[in-house]
């Protein structure tokens, strides 16, 4: 087995036992894990040795490179027994809907979001988790994951919904390894395009500038790929998700006059405001159309 997907529905003790056996048995071949149940009975992430009655057991997944789990509740894979030396991308999935326990909708029950009254815990958890995600320092979420997964390249935040059978994910932001600082790159560009006029007429200097101009298209990508600091940087999607993409998740874009998309440095609070507006703009007159199907969820093993 190379891929495991759990999308929506509930995972109780028996289901976690079955999933635990699968991941433990296939630890040497598992490459992709997407784990996004709506409700669990303790197992917010599958514990690899749970099927043996060991809730603290550890398993190494040597070729697992991509993992997707919920943004809320907060989960650190290493704390649940997952040793991921080859992990390159961790995707945190944000679902704005609040579903009744085990998705037991009452007739005519209105759709709710984490921004509705009575959901203050989820709103606080969202802000706390998002604040840790956009922290590019040593205490940020990316740095903490990288401490146990040294191959980590990026942590992504995607918007999604269990009610979407296509399992679409809309990118919001990415925390990745810090690239070449702009002041350093700018200096290279200046040397490349505007050599010192005082050096004109000196054969050695002119040959050096000519060599740099010819090598620059190849040299720049190599320099950027090396990493310039043991730090992380936040990259926000250049534009918000499209109206069509949001409609699949049961959301709508805020009115044009109110929409404010975050930029680097103000990603967390502005992004929370934008998310709240998408929920306020959405129609919430009745239970979501996918409620019946999401109660059972979808499990895919490949």
Image: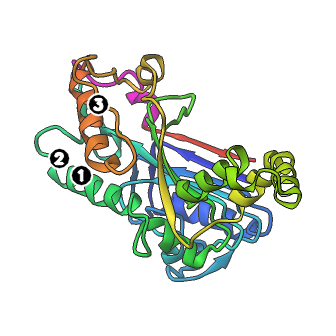
Majority secondary structure in the magenta region:
loop
Where residue 100 appears, x then y in whole percent?
27, 41
User: What is the C-alpha distance between the residues marked 3 and 2?
Assistant: 24 Å
Residue 49 shows up from this direction: no
Where residue 36 appears, x then y in whole percent?
49, 49
User: What is the C-alpha distance between the residues marked 1 and 3?
Assistant: 22 Å
Q: Which mark is residue 260?
A: 3
Element class at badge 3: loop
Q: Which residues are magenta?
A: 285-294
Q: In the image, which is nearer the foreground, mark 3 or mark 2?
A: 3
User: What is the C-alpha distance between the residues marked 2 and 1?
Assistant: 6 Å
Query: Is 287 within the magenta?
Result: yes
Q: Are marks 1 and 3 in contact (CB under 8 Å)?
A: no
Relative to residue 152, is residue 162 depicted above or below? Answer: above
Label 1 sits on residue: 122
Task: Name the residue located 40 percent from the left edge and 59 percent from the top edge.
Answer: 133
Quarter holding the N terminus? bottom right
Task: Name the residue located 77 percent from the left edge and 65 percent from the top edge.
Answer: 63
Q: Are marks 2 and 1 in contact (CB under 8 Å)?
A: yes
Whichever of callouts 1 and 3 sits on the residue coming sooner in the sequence is 1
């Amino acid at each position: 087995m190379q891929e495991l997907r759990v999308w929506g529905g509930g995972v109780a003790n028996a289901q976690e036992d079955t999933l635990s056996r699968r991941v433990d048995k296939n630890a040497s071949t598992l490459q992709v894990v997407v784990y996004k149940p709506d409700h669990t009975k303790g197992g917010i992430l599958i514990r690899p040795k749970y099927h043996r009655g060991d809730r603290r057991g550890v398993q190494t997944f040597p070729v697992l490179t991509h993992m997707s789990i919920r943004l809320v509740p907060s989960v650190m894979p290493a704390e649940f027994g997952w040793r991921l030396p080859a992990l390159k991308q961790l995707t945190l999935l944000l679902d704005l809907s609040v579903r009744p326990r085990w998705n037991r909708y009452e007739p005519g029950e209105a759709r709710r979001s984490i921004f509705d009254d009575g959901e203050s815990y989820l709103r606080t958890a969202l802000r706390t988790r998002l604040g840790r995600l956009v922290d590019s320092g040593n205490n940020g979420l990316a740095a903490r994951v990288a401490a146990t997964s040294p191959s980590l390249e990026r942590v992504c935040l995607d918007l999604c919904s269990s009610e979407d059978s296509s399992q679409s994910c809309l990118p919001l932001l990415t925390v990745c390894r810090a690239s070449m600082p702009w002041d350093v790159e700018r200096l290279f560009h200046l040397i490349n395009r505007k050599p010192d006029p005082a050096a004109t007429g000196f054969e050695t200097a002119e040959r050096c500038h000519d060599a740099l101009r010819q090598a620059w298209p190849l040299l720049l990508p190599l320099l950027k790929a090396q990493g310039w600091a043991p730090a992380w940087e936040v990259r926000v999607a250049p534009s918000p998700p499209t109206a069509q993409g949001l409609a699949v998740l049961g959301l709508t874009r805020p009115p044009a006059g109110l929409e404010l998309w975050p930029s680097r440095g103000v990603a967390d609070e502005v992004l929370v405001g934008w998310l709240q507006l998408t929920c306020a703009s959405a129609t919430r007159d009745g239970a979501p159309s996918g409620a019946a199907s999401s109660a059972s969820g979808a499990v895919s093993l490949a």
